Image: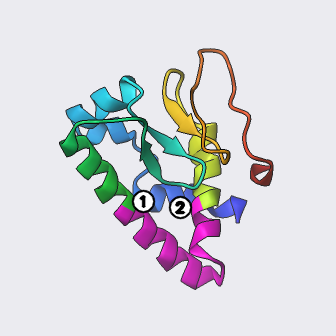
Amino acid sequence: MRRNAQLILLAVGLATPLAAQSPQLAEAISAGQVGERFDGYMGVVGGAPAPVERQVRAINIQRRNLYIDLSQRRNVSPDLVGMTAGCELLSRLPAGEAYMLPDGSWRRRAAGQGIRLPDYCR
């Protein structure tokens, strides 16, 4: 499934930075209010303005629909597709952005520091 991560990201439009979609979303990402989760979805860290939360929900609905479609084509679970996308998203996360690991804790990627990816990403 890892080999298909690039296709998943391209299909859902994740190869283009999400911040380019909305100035408010870009601001929330920079402020650490929104980040990528290990499971291939975006998450709100603490609180964010209501329009940003709506954007995050809309992005997650699009991602979920894509994961369901791809899972049916490959005869795997949508969660597996999402986690595969999550591995790729976390590995490409720019410095300063927030991310969530499987233990539910949010962190911010420091400049020059990698992210300890979940074991299933290897």
The residue that label 1 is drawn on is 12
Q: Quadrant of residue 79?
A: bottom right
- Which residues fall within the magenta stretch? 61-82
Residue at (66, 79) in percent of width and height: 76
In front here: 67 or 107? Answer: 107
Most extreme residue toward the left is: 51
Quadrant of image for the N terminus: bottom right
Most extreme residue toward the top is: 111
In front here: 4 or 85? Answer: 85
Looking at the picture, how far across and down is residue 72, in whole percent? Answer: 56, 84
- Asked if labels 2 and 1 touch by Cβ distance under 8 angstroms, the answer is yes
Type of secondary structure dominating the magenta stretch: helix
Q: Amino acid at mark 2?
A: Ile
> Is 85 on the left-hand or right-hand side of 102?
left
The residue that label 2 is drawn on is 8
Looking at the picture, how far across and down is residue 33, in whole percent? Answer: 38, 31
What scheme was used to colour the molecule?
Answer: rainbow
Does 60 lie within the magenta span?
no
> Is 72 on the left-hand or right-hand side of 30?
right
Q: Secondary structure at mark 1?
A: helix
Q: Quadrant of residue 11?
A: bottom left
**How dense is the environment of label 2, judged by Cα within 10 Å: few (below 14), some, or many (20 and up)?**
many
Q: Quadrant of residue 89?
A: top right
Residue at (44, 48) in percent of width and height: 42
Per the model, the C-alpha gap separating discs 1 and 2 is: 6 Å
Note whether 13 is above or below 46 in the view shown: below
Does 73 lie within the magenta span?
yes
Q: Amino acid at mark 1?
A: Val
Q: Secondary structure at mark 2?
A: helix
Note whether 27 is above or below 56 in the view shown: above
Looking at the picture, how far across and down is residue 57, in whole percent? Answer: 32, 56
The number of numbered badges drawn on the structure is: 2
